[in-house]
Amino acid sequence: MDNFNDISSPRALLATRRSGKARDMVAPGPDAAQLAAMLAVAARVPDHGKLAPWRFITVAPEARAGFAALLETAYRHEHAAPGATEIEAIRNFAHQAPCLVIVVSQPVSASHIPRWEQELSAGAATMQLCNAAHAQGFVANWLTGCCLMWRISGSRTLMTVRRGATSTP
Ligand SMILES: Cc1cc2nc3c(=O)[nH]c(=O)nc-3n(C[C@H](O)[C@H](O)[C@H](O)COP(=O)(O)O)c2cc1C
């Protein structure tokens, strides 16, 4: 295929979809209005029960260092004696690409909708976010990498997410 992310029509875009590599991405990323439009599209996914069981967290440039520290803390929870190379890779992860959005799966446990359906909706939202970025002429990359590690360890929560707010203890 010689024309990736062909935005001449919705069908062409879906047929030619291709990720970019986050580590190769350069500025400019989307401005605030473009990013808001992408997130609105991302939220238009199948969502059984209309629970919105996902959250989007945009990591501002000035928050990248804090995010890197958070990832490192999470990694150290999981790995007893990480090497310097591992830690460097984790810190670099937080600084790549001009725009970084964290998609958090946040199932509503009180709902009768099964958790796995809610998690699939979060995955669909992530895919939709990538497609929305491509539709606006940007490239996107869906990465989990080390970031699958958000979890409650003992009684300490590494990150809490509430509607409209995020905090890192
Ligand atoms: C849930 C999920 C997690 C992923 N995590 C990573 C990752 O951590 N690192 C990576 O290189 N690719 C990851 N990928 C794959 C890339 O997003 C991408 O799909 C892959 O590089 C193939 O490129 P393409 O999207 O152009 O087909 C992940 C894909 C999915 C669906």
Image: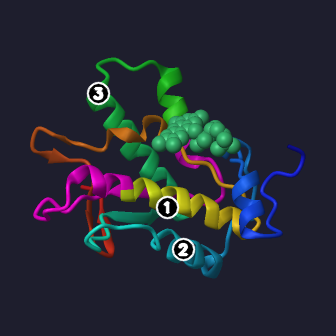
Whether residue 92 can be seen here: no
Q: How many marks?
A: 3
Mark 1 lies on a secondary structure that is loop
Q: Secondary structure at mark 3?
A: helix
How dense is the environment of label 1, judged by Cα within 10 Å: few (below 14), some, or many (20 and up)? some
Examine the rendered structure and indicate whether residue 101 appears above or below residue 156: below
Residue 47 lies in the magenta-colored region: no
CB of residue at label 2: within 8 Å of ligand 1?
Answer: no
Front label number (2 vs 3): 2
CA–CA distance in space, label 2 to label 3: 34 Å
Q: Residue at x 47, y 29 (%)?
A: 87
Residue at the farthest bottom position: 33
Nearer to us in this view, 25 or 120: 120
Asked whether 114 falls inside the magenta stretch, the response is yes
For the point 62% across and 49% down, the residue is 141
Q: Look at mark 1 in the image and give the residue it sits on.
A: 59
Q: Give the colouring mode of the picture.
A: rainbow
Residue at 46%, 57% in the rendered image: 124
| Residue found at the very far right of the displayed protein | 2
| 2 or 3: tag closer to the N-terminus | 2
User: How many angstroms separate mark 1 from mark 3 (CA)?
Assistant: 23 Å
What residue is pinned by disc 3?
78
Disc number for residue 41? 2
The residue segment tinted magenta is 93-120
| Residue count near mark 3 (Cα–Cα under 10 Å), binned few <14, some 14–19, many ≥20 | few
Measured from the top left, where is residue 144 in percent x and y?
47, 41
**First in sequence: mark 1 or mark 2?**
2
Q: Position of residue 55 (x, y in %)?
A: 36, 65
